[in-house]
Structures are given as structure tokens and as C-alpha cells.
């Protein structure tokens, strides 16, 4: 098992090294693209180090923008899954809740999260509340869908056995329905995380005074492609790290579709 894990790690490292090598050859060796629009990995790395302490031209260091984005993203995300997962579970288990909520949810679900941005700006301005609300909308939809689907896929035989032994509906939900739905719930949490992160960057690009999206937009206006790529890479790294944390949590709670 350890050898297999080491093999996969080496393959991942090799793929990243190959990507960086091709990037370096295209930019610094063959000069296929001008460095002003497509900087080399060396220049991006230098810009990354510089941006740790330099505030120009967007008024903040990389840490300042990252902290602002994480604060809003986690606030909206946690609120979204905190409401979405329980609501999806209740919709999937209780017929009356499904009949009441599903028509409204089906009406709102097709609206893309970025479509809410103009309305949120009109209602809440360009502060944290507006961005957090957009992220909430992004996170709540996938979490509802996956929790709902996971509950609906609960094995009817398991439900029958639980009720045969005298379990009430709520007890059956807690001991049978939710454990069997955990893989789908965690899949929804991951999708919600990606959607939230993308919605945040879009919201910050359109209306914000700080954050990674704002940083990217300001550097685009002054033609600083290296800083733009620093922002993009930071978004990718943080998103990957948050997904990794979710996967570790899933591995501790779920095994073969059942709780450990």
C-alpha cells in the first residue's frame, strides 16, 4: 500500500515538473509569447515573493487579499451547507417537506449564482454581506441536491429492517438514512466548495475593494500579468487545500458508503 501511494505521489510530482518545464520552455527559452502577457514561471515566482510584502498596485499584500477572500468564502460556504444539507435531508425523507420546498427550489435552482450579483449589490452594497450572500446561493444548491439524492437512494431493505425492529421514522433517518447518504453528502460539500470559490472571485471582480478577485481585476487594468497569475495560482492552491481537508474528513467518517 505504501509503495502504491509513493508511486502515485511520484507521478503527481512528475506531472507538475513536466508542466513547469513546458511553461518555462515556451516563455523563457523559445519566447513564443511576450512576457508582458504570458510571464515565465520564474517571473511569476518572483512576483509571488514580491507580493508578500508589496501592496501596489492593488492596495494590499497577497496575505491581505487572501484573508479577505477566505473570510467571506468560508462564512458564505458554511452558512450554505449548514442550511442546504439539513434541508436536502428533510426534503428527501419527509414527503410533506418535499412538496412544500421543491417547487420553490426548482424555480430558483437554474439561476446561476453570478446572476444574483447585481441584485445583491443593489440590496446590500459591495461589502461582505453581498458577497457572502452570493456564496451562500452557490453553496446551498449543490448541498441540497446531493443530500436529497443521497437520502432518496437509501436502501429500502435497510429501512424495512429498522422499522421491523421498532425504529420510528426520525430514528430510522438518523441511524440508517443519513449514514448511507454520507458519500453523496460529501460529494455535495466538495461541489459546493468549488462553486463558492468561483462565485467569490466573480463577485470580487465586479464589486469589491479587497480580495483575490479584486487583486486580479486591478492588476488586469494596469497590465500586470505576473500578479494576475499569482492571484490565479493562489486561488487554485487554496481551493485544492480546502478540498484535501474535506477528503480527509470524509475518509474519517465514511468507508464504503457507511460510517466507520
Image (cartoon, rainbow, N blue to C red):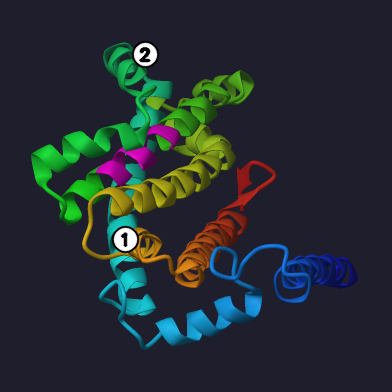
124 vs 23: above or below: above
**What label does residue 95 carry, if any?**
2
Comparing 239 with 21, the one in front is 21
Whichever of labels 2 and 1 marks the residue nearer the N terminus, that label is: 2
Q: Does residue 204 show up magenta in the picture?
A: no
- Name the disc covering residue 186, or none: none
Q: Which residues are magenta?
A: 134-142
Left or right of 130 on screen, residue 40:
right
- Residue 30: x and y, percent? 78, 70
Q: Nearer the viewer, residue 237 or 94?
A: 237
**Residue 58 vertical placement versus 109 (above, below):** below
Residue that carries the numbered disc 1 in the rendered image = 214
Q: In the displayed structure, does residue 42 sit left or right of residue 56?
A: right
Instruction: Point out the image quarter for the N terminus.
Output: bottom right
**Residue 82 coordinates in the image, percent (x, y):** 32, 45
Could you tell me which residue is drawn at 77 percent across and 75 percent down? 29
Locate residue 65, reporting x and y percent: 32, 70
Residue shown at the point (75%, 66%) measured from the top left:
26
Q: Residue at x 61, y 53 (%)?
A: 260
Amino acid at each position: 500500500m505504501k509503495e502504491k501511494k509513493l508511486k502515485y505521489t511520484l507521478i503527481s510530482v512528475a506531472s507538475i515538473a513536466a508542466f513547469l518545464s513546458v511553461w518555462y520552455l515556451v516563455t523563457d527559452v523559445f519566447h513564443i509569447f511576450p512576457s508582458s502577457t504570458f510571464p515565465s514561471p520564474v517571473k511569476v515566482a518572483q512576483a509571488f515573493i514580491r507580493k508578500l510584502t508589496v501592496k501596489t498596485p492593488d492596495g494590499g499584500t497577497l496575505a491581505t487579499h487572501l484573508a479577505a477572500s477566505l473570510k467571506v468564502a468560508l462564512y458564505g460556504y458554511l452558512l450554505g451547507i449548514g442550511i442546504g444539507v439539513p434541508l436536502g435531508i428533510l426534503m428527501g425523507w419527509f414527503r410533506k417537506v418535499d412538496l412544500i420546498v421543491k417547487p420553490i427550489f426548482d424555480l430558483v435552482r437554474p439561476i446561476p449564482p453570478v446572476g444574483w450579483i447585481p441584485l445583491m449589490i443593489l440590496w446590500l452594497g459591495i461589502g461582505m454581506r453581498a458577497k457572502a450572500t452570493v456564496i451562500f446561493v452557490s453553496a446551498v444548491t449543490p448541498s441540497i441536491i446531493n443530500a436529497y439524492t443521497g437520502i432518496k437512494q437509501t436502501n429500502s431493505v435497510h429501512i424495512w429492517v429498522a422499522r421491523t425492529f421498532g425504529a420510528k421514522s426520525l430514528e430510522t433517518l438518523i441511524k440508517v438514512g443519513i449514514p448511507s447518504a454520507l458519500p453523496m453528502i460529501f460529494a455535495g460539500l466538495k461541489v459546493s466548495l468549488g462553486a463558492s470559490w468561483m462565485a467569490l472571485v466573480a463577485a470580487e471582480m465586479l464589486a469589491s475593494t479587497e480580495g483575490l478577485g479584486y487583486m486580479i481585476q486591478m492588476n488586469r487594468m494596469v497590465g500586470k500579468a505576473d500578479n494576475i497569475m499569482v492571484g490565479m495560482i493562489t486561488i487554485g492552491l487554496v481551493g485544492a487545500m480546502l478540498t484535501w481537508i474535506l477528503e480527509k474528513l470524509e475518509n474519517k467518517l465514511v468507508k464504503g458508503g457507511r460510517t466507520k
